[in-house]
């Protein structure tokens, strides 16, 4: 398990956290390789995926800490958080604010990112010990909402997730996001099933370039 600071640095360096929901074990390694080749090195497997423990182990066995950081999303309780940490998760993400999840992640030194929508939830999660705040679903209120939270709470690192696309990714970076989470807009599962992993590499590279350009502005 990586140190929190190393995980945080990798998430920010990647710029994009690839959210793999219901990933197929048969294409998991191919998808991950494709993402890494495109510059995306942060991989999130949702905890409701069948065989999640085995898949986490497969990723950690197949890639070094210098290649990827792997975590779990859709974590709703401390028991699930602990299970995935034991299976190799470097970070834990929730769609909502669960202080028991924050507490157990802090106990075992794992980066944790609860989901919030309001400024009150954001500061509550940060005060409870969150390392990164996931603004979710980000697209419901747009980058302007993220910018409004970032204004008075510039000390809180934000990761907007939910509805982010290649077209709006830069807007969220410019609004103050440290990194973003992207799912179906990033990973084409149908292409993976056909063995066309280069399609995923091209999309990952496009996301990476948009984020790099937004950070440079």
Image (tube, rainbow, N blue to C red):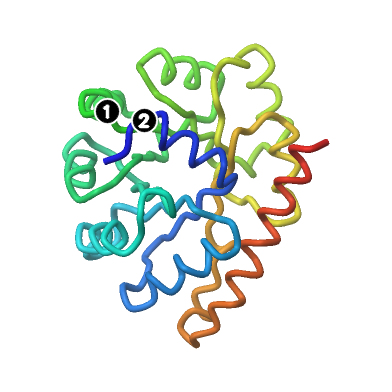
Q: Are marks 2 and 1 in contact (CB under 8 Å)?
A: yes
Residue at image x 74%, y 44%? 170
Q: Position of residue 217 (x, y in %)?
A: 83, 36
Crowding near the residue tagged with mark 2, few <14, some 14–19, many ≥20 C-alpha atoms within 10 Å:
some
Q: Mark number for residue 216?
A: none
Q: In whole angstroms, how far apart are the C-alphas of marks 2 and 1?
A: 6 Å
Q: Position of residue 95 (x, y in %)?
A: 42, 40
Q: Mark number for residue 4?
A: 2
Point out the tag, 2 or 1, that comes first from the N-terminus: 2
Viewer-side residue, 5 vs 42: 5
Viewer-side residue, 144 vs 130: 130
Count of labels in the image: 2
As drawn, the residue found furthest toward the bottom would be 194
Q: Position of residue 198 (x, y in %)?
A: 59, 77
- In the shown orientation, is residue 28 left or right of residue 217? left
Residue at image x 69%, y 22%? 148
Residue at image x 44%, y 54%? 67
Residue at image x 59%, y 57%? 39
Name the residue beneath numbered marker 1: 109
Q: Is residue 66 above or below residue 20?
A: above
Crowding near the residue tagged with mark 1, few <14, some 14–19, many ≥20 C-alpha atoms within 10 Å:
some
Please identify the quarter of the rendering in which residue 124 is found.
top left
- In the shown orientation, is residue 3 left or right of residue 188? left
Q: Is residue 78 above or below residue 23?
A: above
Does dot 2 land on a helix, a strand or a loop?
A: helix
As drawn, the residue found furthest toward the right would be 217
Q: Which part of the image, by quadrant, shows the N terminus? A: top left
């Amino acid at each position: 398990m990586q140190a929190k600071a190393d995980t945080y640095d990798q998430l920010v360096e990647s710029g994009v956290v690839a959210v793999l929901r219901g990933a197929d074990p048969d294409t998991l390694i191919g998808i991950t390789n494709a993402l890494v080749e495109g510059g995306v090195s942060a991989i999130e497997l949702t905890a409701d995926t069948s065989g999640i423990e085995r898949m986490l182990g497969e990723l950690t066995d197949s890639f070094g800490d210098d290649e990827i950081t792997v975590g779990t999303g859709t974590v709703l309780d401390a028991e699930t958080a602990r299970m995935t940490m034991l299976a190799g998760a470097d970070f834990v993400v929730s769609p909502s604010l669960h202080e028991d999840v924050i507490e157990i992640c802090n106990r075992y030194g794992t980066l944790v990112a609860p989901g919030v929508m309001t400024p009150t939830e954001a500061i509550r999660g940060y005060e409870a010990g969150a390392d990164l705040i996931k603004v979710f679903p980000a697209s419901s209120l747009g980058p302007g909402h993220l910018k409004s939270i970032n204004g008075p709470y510039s000390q809180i690192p934000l990761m907007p997730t939910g509805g982010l696309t290649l077209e709006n990714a830069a807007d969220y970076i410019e609004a103050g996001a440290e990194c973003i989470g992207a799912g179906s807009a990033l990973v084409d599962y149908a292409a993976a099933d056909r063995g066309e992993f280069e399609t995923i590499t091209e999309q990952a590279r496009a996301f990476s370039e948009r984020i790099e350009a937004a950070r440079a502005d």
